[in-house]
Amino acid sequence: MESKKLFILSKLTELEDELRNLELWTRETLTEEQLRSSAPFGCDVMDFHEWLQHMMIPRLKQIIEKGEKVPFKMDTASMAEYVYRDDISKYRRLIVILKTLDRAVKVCL
């Protein structure tokens, strides 16, 4: 696997670790309703961190493993800045990781 894809995988691991550090990682699985959501970031049926955990992270891993192109434009950092705007300092590291991922996916996949 090329180094750019390995870099993205390492950032996904970093993202997962940060979600755990912030106590946003859940053991719950998504419901059928949540899986069917077509709203951006699943915002109609789940919190942003749930979308990161259950939708974005697994989907990007799958794309990398299969060698596919990303079928969407990533702008997760902007969404995180909006969602966490009231306590931005607490989520700064999470946002930095997402900015790095957004840029890496745009260039690599």
Image (tube, rainbow, N blue to C red):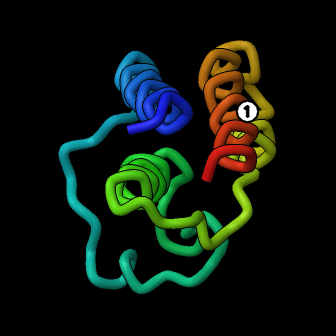
Q: How many marks?
A: 1
Query: Is 103 or 88 nearer to us in this picture?
Result: 103
The type of residue carrying mark 1 is: Lys
Residue, x 49% and y 72% (percent of image)? 45
- Residue 68 x %, y %: 47, 66
Q: Which residue is mark 1?
A: 99
Q: Secondary structure at mark 1?
A: helix
User: Does residue 34 appear in this view?
Assistant: yes
Residue, x 42% and y 59% (percent of image)? 67
Query: Is 41 or 74 nearer to us in this picture?
Result: 74
Q: Residues within 10 Å of mark 1 (few under 14, many from 20)?
A: some
Residue 31 relative to residue 83: left or right: left
User: Does residue 50 appear in this view?
Assistant: no
Residue, x 21% and y 53% (percent of image)? 28
User: Image quadrant for the N terminus?
Assistant: top left
Residue 7 relative to residue 104: left or right: left
- Residue 102 x %, y %: 70, 42
